[in-house]
Image (tube, rainbow, N blue to C red):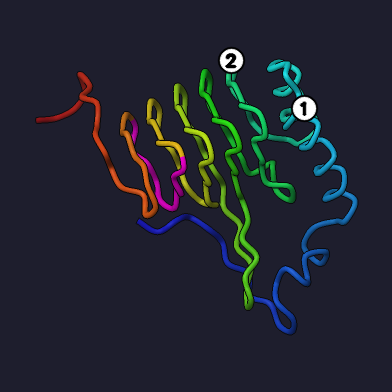
Amino acid sequence: MARKVTRYPVEGPNALWQIYRTVSPFKGVKNFIFIQLARYCPILPMKNWIYRNMLGMKVGRHTAFGLMVMVDVFFPEHITIGENSVIGYNTTILAHEYLIKEYRLGEVRIGENVLIGANTTILPGVTIGDGAVVAAGSVVHKDVAPGTFVGGNPLRELSRTSTENESI
């Protein structure tokens, strides 16, 4: 399944060179400072406060971000993470892609009780369902079904937990 991103074509130099036509430089600098504070902050409630109140992310109760997590600096408000999820050390969550002839924006939705392993990259426009587990070092380039254990690059299903509501 294709990621859910909106594409914006550009003329002239590559899209990243034109970034400040799409994002205020002030917003980029402000977000960068608060993201760096959150990356190193050892106090989980304070980290979540920064994400919610300074960056506009939707972060559920008891969600835990490991050390060095890097959220999207230009569009953090496009990131939603449900309750009681764990985002592993040094994970990157992107809501944008700047390419040569276009840039793309997409919402990132991470469900409740999700475990994201360390050093994972989550690309724009993906949804990770409730109860999913993403193995360390994975690149999430497509949606992940609820209750699924996925990993690798390219991402593949490793196993699925059965639920009472699953049809046989």
Residue drawn at (45%, 27%), measured in percent from left and top? 115
Position of 5 with respect to 22 (left or right) is left
Secondary structure of the residue carrying numbered label 2: loop
The amino acid sitting under disc 1 is Ile
Query: Left of 163 or right of it: where is 41?
Result: right
Q: Earlier in the sequence, mark 2 or mark 1?
A: 1
Q: Which mark is residue 50?
A: 1
Where residue 52 appears, as percent x and y from the top left, is: 72, 28
Answer whether residue 147 is magenta in the image.
Answer: no
Q: Could you tell whether 14 is left or right of 64 in the image?
A: right
**Count of marks placed on residues:** 2
The CA distance from mark 2 to mark 1 is 14 Å
**144 drawn magenta:** yes
Q: Residue at x 73, y 23 (%)?
A: 47
Name the image quarter holding the N terminus: bottom left
Is the magenta region chiefly helix, strand or loop? Answer: loop
Give the image location of residue 154, x and y in percent.
37, 54
Magenta-highlighted residues: 137-146
Quarter occupied by residue 71: top right
Residue 127 to residue 95: above or below: above
Residue in view at x 72 percent, y 68 percent:
16
* In the image, farthest residue toward the right: 26
Q: At numbered mark 1, what does the secondary structure look like: helix, strand or loop? A: helix
Q: Which numbered marker is on residue 62?
A: 2
- The answer to whether residue 47 is above or below residue 8 is above
Q: Residues within 10 Å of mark 2 (few under 14, many from 20)?
A: some
At a point 76% along the width and 24% down the height, the residue shown is 41
